[in-house]
Amino acid sequence: MKKISSIDELKKAGEKGAKSLFPSSVKIIVGMATSGIASGADKVYEALDKEIKKKKLPYILAKTGSMGMDFIEPLVDVIEKDKPRLSFGKMTPEKVPQLLEQIGKGNIDKIKPIYRTDAEDIIAKCEKKHYLKGNVSEYLKDIPQMEAIPFYKKQIKIATRNCGVIDPESIDEYIARGGYLSLHKALTTMSANEIIDEIIKSGLRGRGGGGFPAGVKWQSCRSAHGDIKYVICNGDEGDPGAYMDRSIMEGDPHSVIEGMIIGAYAIGAQEGFIYVRNEYPLAVANLTKAIGDARSRGMLGKNILGTNFSFDIKISKGAGAFVCGESTALMASLEGKAGEPRAKYIHTVEHGLWDRPSNLNNVETWANVPVIISRSGKWFSEIGIPNNSGTKVFSLVGKVNNIGLVEVPLGIPLKDIVYDIGGGIPGNRKFKAVQTGGPSGGCIPASMIDLSVDFDSLWDAGSMMGSGGMIVMDEKTCMVDLARYFIEFLVSESCGKCTPCREGVRRMNDILHDICAGKGREGDIELLEAMAKGIKDGSLCALGGSAPNPVLSTIKYFREEYDAHIRQKRCPAGVCRALIKYEINAKKCTGCTVCAKKCPSGCISGEKKKAHKIDQKKCIKCGICMESCKFDAITVK
């Protein structure tokens, strides 16, 4: 690849990328993020590739990252010249021949696309420069636009602006979307202080969970003494149910790289590191390719874009320790040491990696930087609410219809995410709570469904933003069992360096296990609360300091469930095995024998077409009988 050293050369690369985004021939794009592959997108891609080659069709087959709508993956998009981009959900290898046949006949709209995206909108929603414009095809006007469907209607794409749009392996397509124009602007027209001022004006807060103002951190690192400084990207996303950073690294790695280069120039660093979980092989592969391409094109290495600034990035793979998401533990791991945190009074912006000034932000934070430099800090600050500007990416999972990746303005009501974007609760069950902030976060009850989703409101409610995991729960979720699950996770992930976390969290886990097993005693709740205060006050890092949050928030909002477990030896949600029993309603049972056939312990008996019974002594409480019954004849008490 030829190195780019001028704005004209950068624009030429963008024009080439625009032709790749919207070629003259038909282009078929498959969502090939980890979420898509898990749903079978790789099989769909293989089927398309085989069929196109077999029939010698003049079609271009490409890959893209997460389109966000995980609940209808695999997703396939089709682009024809002068026509909107059409999206098709739940694609299977068996449907591929029909799709290709209808494309050839010009009747692709008959396959019922989910939505369309007009060409002129898709190029650069978040950028000023448009390299290409397209026309809306009249015969497709009845197909809803992307922004019209509920899932996307209240979203604003900034950090995920390119995910599901570009081929993450194509640097030219990234440039066509305005990529590296911000870098050129920063290096050629702005001073380091001007860049930092824009980040401060934007109000951008760290999206990794801490919520510290990014610009203030950058300024502190720039002002720190030392000739050698580092910028670091935290891609060590370990929260159960969270995959925001992974999706950005997989779908738009250049946005992270460009943000880091701009940050390095502002801070005065010449070396950077991206710390990624080893469990993210696709993210590592796409980042590696992107770094290599950026280096070949002159965006990394010596004299970037023909200027005097030099900077390079290395990837470091973590071994999966949850504690390495903490800044000092992450830096210790980068140095080749055990991933253990250190006291916070030593600031990493002054004494970080190898005792040198180091600036660490997470993936999403870095991905926002190029857009802020392009559109201005003022523009970014006007999105969201005061002190909580911009957008936040969430992985919306759990008991919600529209599972997926969403990016919403901060300050949006929680109910808008759960019901308007998420589509509500499956099976018309009642919404019970939302867990935010991962294992260190807390649970927001249904009574607070109108809560503003922002750093401060979540903290005041006893939870936290965290990196952006959002787990929705319905009436069938036991909140005591949920707290036990997260505390058990933290026990296994504690580094063990400090006693309050190592021993305190373990003891909380023991108490919660006893409560769920019907062995809870009076005073256990008060003991948990007292221990939580000690663990919070005495722990060395944020893992221990926030570990009690799931327990404290569930006690605060769902204390009656703890009381039922302890005093009545009953699990109201019907989850804790030691406290429940399955029974068959004789009036509803048709004697179909399905439950008896599927029961692994042989505890169900009865004649065909007559009501059956469950032998409670043999029942292992697995719940298979209830899942298999089509007549709602089996209840849990």
Image: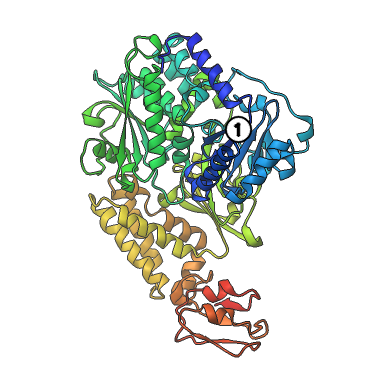
User: How has the structure been colored for display?
Assistant: rainbow
When asked about the image quadrant of residue 609, the answer is bottom right
Question: Visible in this render: residue 178?
Answer: no
Q: Residue 375 at what x, y percent from top left?
A: 55, 20
* 515 displayed left or right of 147: left
The residue depicted at 59 percent of the width and 43 percent of the height is 75
Q: Mark 1: which secondary structure?
A: loop
For the image, the number of numbered tags is 1
* Residue 582 rendering spot, x and y as whole percentages: 53, 79
**Nearer the observer, 15 or 255:** 15
Q: Amino acid at mark 1?
A: Tyr
Residue identified by numbered label 1: 59
Name the residue located 58 percent from the left edge and 21 percent from the top edge: 19
Most foreground residue, 289 or 351: 289
| In this view, 530 is above or below 16 | below
Q: Residues within 10 Å of mark 1 (few under 14, many from 20)?
A: some
User: Measuring 64% from the left and 53% from the top, which residue is drawn there?
Assistant: 424
Q: Which quadrant, please, contains the N terminus? A: top left
